[in-house]
Amino acid sequence: MGLSQQQLARIIGITYQQAHKYERGQNRISAGRLFSVAQALATEPAWFFDGLGADNVVEELPPRQRMQMELMRNFASIKDEKQQEALSSMARLLAGS
């Protein structure tokens, strides 16, 4: 994101050595600290988990829940607001029938 370890450490209020240990995986990072790092990098905490493959999944989701997650992901990737509204209306109609 264009910051050095020293700059990031200063922004989130830790030492360079601590930031280095976090980056190398020598120390665990708390959820609160991860949130601070995400804010400093102008991103969401979920960004740190992007790209994790199925090999890292501890528990397999039930098929129905997996389908719901996929539907949400696909809906969020639709850029055209009118298309999102149309899809939402269609889902409401189908749910009512």
Image (cartoon, rainbow, N blue to C red):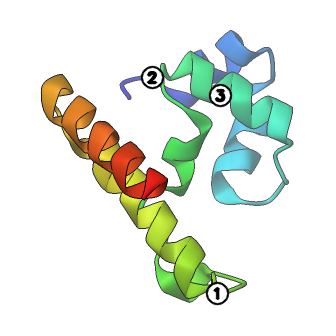
Q: Which residue is mark 1?
A: 60
Q: CA distance from mark 2 to mark 1?
A: 36 Å
Element under disc 2: loop
Q: Disc 1 or disc 3, which is closer to the eye?
A: 1
Q: Quadrant of the C terminus?
A: bottom left
Figure disc tally = 3
Decide which of tag 1 and tag 3 comes sooner along the chain.
3
Relative to 31, 97 lies left or right: left
Residue 5, given in percent of the width and then of the height, sits at 57, 30
Q: Within the image, what quadrant is residue 80 found in?
A: top left
Local packing at callout 3 (Cα closer than 10 Å; few below 14, some 14-19, many 20+) is many
Disc number placed over residue 37 in the picture, else none? 3
At 60% from the left and 81% from the top, the residue drawn is 56
At 54% from the left and 85% from the top, the residue drawn is 63
**Foreground residue among 60 and 80:** 80
Element under disc 3: helix
Looking at the rendered structure, the kind of residue marked 1 is Glu
Q: CA distance from mark 1 to mark 3?
A: 29 Å
Looking at the rendered structure, the kind of residue marked 2 is Leu
Q: Disc 2 or disc 1, which is closer to the eye?
A: 1
Instruction: Identify whether 63 is placed above or below 83.
Output: below
Decide which of tag 2 and tag 1 comes sooner along the chain.
2
At 72% from the left and 60% from the top, the residue drawn is 25
**Foreground residue among 71 and 77:** 71
Looking at the rendered structure, the kind of residue marked 3 is Val
Q: Quadrant of the N terminus?
A: top left
Local packing at callout 2 (Cα closer than 10 Å; few below 14, some 14-19, many 20+) is few
Disc number placed over residue 3 in the picture, else none? 2
Q: CA distance from mark 2 to mark 3?
A: 11 Å
Q: Disc 2 or disc 3, which is closer to the eye?
A: 3
